[in-house]
Amino acid sequence: MANIAFIGLGNMGGPMAANLVKAGHKVTAFDLVAASRDQAKADGAAIAESSVASIKGADIVITMLPAGKHVLSVWNEVIPGMTKGALIIDCSTIDVESAKQAHALAVKHGALSVDAPVSGGTGGAKGATLTFMCGGEDKAFAAAKPVLENMGKKLVHCGGGGAGQAAKICNNMILGISMIGVGEAFALAEKLGLSHQALFDVASTSSGQCWALTSYCPVPGPVPASPANNGYKPGFASALMVKDLTLAQDAANAAGAATPLGKHAQEIYKAFDAAGHGGVDFSGIIQHVRSLAAK
Ligand code: NAD
């Protein structure tokens, strides 16, 4: 079992750290927010007074933070204190450029590093069923694998440093676009007098089939576990979809890729967020689509 420092104990990091404790690791945790530290303590972690204090004697350091600037700031603070050859993993969703800069900091110090953003949301974090998309050297991925398996059920090694973040934003761009597409199809079906169930029964077994429809259907009924049956409580909040679509647009602009539907999806989610619905599950975008017709 490893000595693990866990920094960033929010909606995702808190339950992920708790799963590492459950798996038998010695976890030393830190967050800026006192209530998150208290929860981690109740879950069995030791609490440190700062990021730097948390990594004392750690074999593995894990960060789960809001954005690239937080990750770079924490990695800059903690890496100089890490044992040579120790491993640092970032599970946050951040921009590819910051992820590459973070890897470079680790390499300079002789530490192994992996970017390992997740999909699966807070339910996956609690249930240890996350998917990890990993970027880093083979040796670093091999070292990260056993500990990530304590928090998730699927790991994909996507390539070198930053490849995990690249995979994450490409995947979420598909998701953002396809959820709007599915919402538009249901909104059109409503106007045409076609029932939700009839459209679902046809499209879920035809060429319109996709995850946004079959696992996360944006209307109540056909998929009982989808947030549409629960007042669109997240799930995955629309504000986080705006974040990921913005990361995708930034990456597309920097790399010179054309992503016209990704750009349009970003604008649509931004409008939904600006209208005060950032806390609504992203499948609630169907409400925005319907409201466009009413104008
Ligand atoms: P959150 O805001 O609940 O948690 C982030 C935590 O980081 C907060 O508790 C904050 O206090 C802490 N923090 C910020 N700066 C810090 C610092 N310098 N030192 C120590 N702690 C610091 O966010 P979350 O929902 O847990 O998401 C974390 C990351 O995971 C984000 O990058 C997000 O995009 C990604 N993500 C979230 C979800 C989701 O459904 N919530 C799903 C997939 C990926």
Image: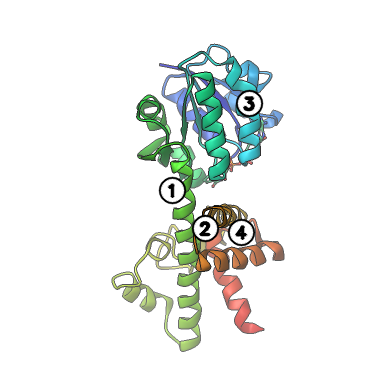
Residue under numbered circle 2: 256
Determine which of the numbered discs, if any, sits on residue 66 in the image. none
Ranked by sequence position, the earlier of labels 1 and 2 is 1
Graded by Cα atoms within 10 Å as few (under 14), some (14 to 19) or many (20 or more), the crowding at tag 2 reads few
Determine which of the numbered discs, if any, sits on residue 167 in the image. 1
Residue depicted at x 64% and y 63%: 270
Determine which of the numbered discs, if any, sits on residue 76 in the image. 3
Q: Looking at numbered disc 2 in the image, what kind of residue is underneath it?
A: Gly
Residue 143 found in image quarter: top left
Residue under numbered circle 4: 280
Q: Is mark 4 within 8 Å of ligand 1?
A: no
Which structural element holds mark 4? loop
Q: Looking at numbered disc 1 in the image, what kind of residue is underneath it?
A: Ala
| Screen quadrant of the N terminus | top left
Q: Do the residues bearing badges 3 and 2 touch, measured as CB atoms within 8 Å?
A: no
Ligand 1 lies in which image quarter? top right
Which structural element holds mark 2? loop
Q: Is mark 2 within 8 Å of ligand 1?
A: no
